[in-house]
Amino acid sequence: MNEYDSNRILDLTKKINYISTKKIEEANCYILNTCHIREKATDKVYHDIGRLKKEFRNKTKPIVLVAGCVAQAEGEVILKKEKYIDAVIGPQSYHQINQTIRKLERREKFINLTNFDVIEKFDSLNSIKNTDNKISAFLTIQEGCDKFCKFCVVPYTRGAEYSRSLKEIVVEAKQLVDNGAKEITLLGQNVNAFNHDKKKLSDLINEISEINNLERIRYSTSHPLDFSKDLVKVHKSNKKLMPLIHLPVQSGSNQVLKAMNRNHTIEKYLDIVRELKEARSDLKFSSDFIIGYPGETDDDFQKTISIMNEIKFINSFSFLFSARPGTPAFNLKKTNQKIAKERLIIFQKIAEKIKIDYRKSLINKNSKVLFENKMKINNRYFGRDEFFNSVIVESDENLQGKIKSVEILNVNQNTLFGKLISNQNHENYAA
Ligand code: SF4
């Protein structure tokens, strides 16, 4: 979502003639768009500002803005701690960025914009064309969260759940397709809670799939509680919807899920996976895990390993519990950190083995790959298969924006390597 927000910030600032540069030393305005999900993100802000100060030593200082969730959560603190920062702008206030830059040009200092103006924000953004021209583009459809998992900052930094209207989303999706997008990922902190005027995510997917030249649709990130029957069904009926679902489980233990306030059991999670597999048998899953949540016992941890082994997530993102200030879990007694770290290492080894075994199973099979860009070396093209695996092939033909059948020849932990198959109707697709 930060990538989407950054693109939209660029669309906004173009209106006052600020354009992006890859050369930091040229910048007269520096906007740091931040994430607050983990502790290191805040440290990174100070680190980046430190680098910037060095870069601009003996030169005119650029305007410096910190946007995003760190700005929302720690606005006053960072303004006081780091005087090099001129303004903080929360994720629901960035539509006011141009007025803020203008004020800073007039040397007004230390502006703190951290209101939750989400309706106003999207009203402003709707009036500006989305100029992102990537083959695979992001589109925010929903923001905020009402779930209040005890470890999570999102309800405090992005605010309550808000869904955009179907109409404005479709307009923006068409803009992205006109700009060249072949794939759109619908984004929301709780994307399957999307609900506007009784229109749900399934309605939106069906509506967007009517757009000519849009080939693929994805969505992220879902909560198990919001996996409604209609959304399950759309995985069966809508061929543009890709067969990978990112469905965070966080823990395999009901006791930990309860302590986290996830409000579902592991049995419920498995039911959803089963229903989805019944709807579309080749569906694959990826997930998020928190290891070492306060109170996690060895038995709880073994249950997390069991769920990993049972579902065989093809991608998993696992982290040690990170206590975020302002969340209910912040003051809980931490699990012994040595034990927690050992568990994380064990878990990640298992997850990596599952991932590499899955990747090896793709060798000599065919994948349908949407090519996103040409790489710098040897006529190589980078794309993604239907399951979001990175694929690289060599080709003299310009593949950008095309979907091609590829035979997978080799794999490593991060990438599949293949060759275009000459008969593009060839069957033997990976499932
Ligand atoms: S559902 Fe997701 S975004 Fe909402 S509080 Fe829980 S972890 Fe955070």
Image (spheres, rainbow, N blue to C red):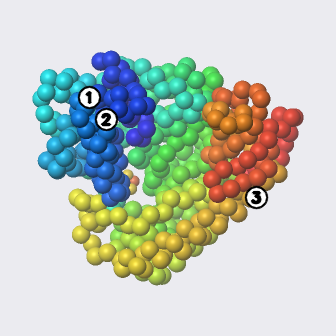
Among numbered discs 2 and 1, the one appearing first in the sequence: 2
**What amino acid type should be assigned to the residue bearing mark 2?**
Ile
**What amino acid type should be assigned to the residue bearing mark 3?**
Ser
Q: Measure the alpha-carbon separation of dots 2 and 1.
A: 10 Å
Label number found at residue 361: 3
Q: Quadrant of residue 346?
A: bottom right
Q: Measure the alpha-carbon separation of dots 1 and 3.
A: 49 Å
Mark 3 is surrounded, within 10 Å at the Cα level, by few (under 14), some (14 to 19) or many (20 or more) other residues, namely some
| x 26%, y 28%: residue | 97
State left or right for residue 205 relative to residue 412: left
| x 28%, y 47%: residue | 50
Q: Position of residue 277 (x, y in %)?
A: 65, 55
| Callout 1: SS | helix
Among numbered discs 1 and 3, the one appearing first in the sequence: 1
Q: Nearer the viewer, residue 112 or 230?
A: 112
**What amino acid type should be assigned to the residue bearing mark 1?**
Ile
Instruction: Say which residue label 2 marks.
Output: 31
Above or below, 302 relative to 277: below
Instruction: Say which residue label 1 marks.
Output: 97
Among numbered discs 3 and 2, the one appearing first in the sequence: 2
Q: Position of residue 377 (x, y in %)?
A: 68, 37
Q: Are marks 2 and 1 in contact (CB under 8 Å)?
A: yes
Q: Nearer the viewer, residue 150 or 200?
A: 150
Q: Quadrant of residue 147?
A: bottom left
State left or right for residue 424 relative to residue 138: right
Q: Quadrant of residue 216?
A: top right
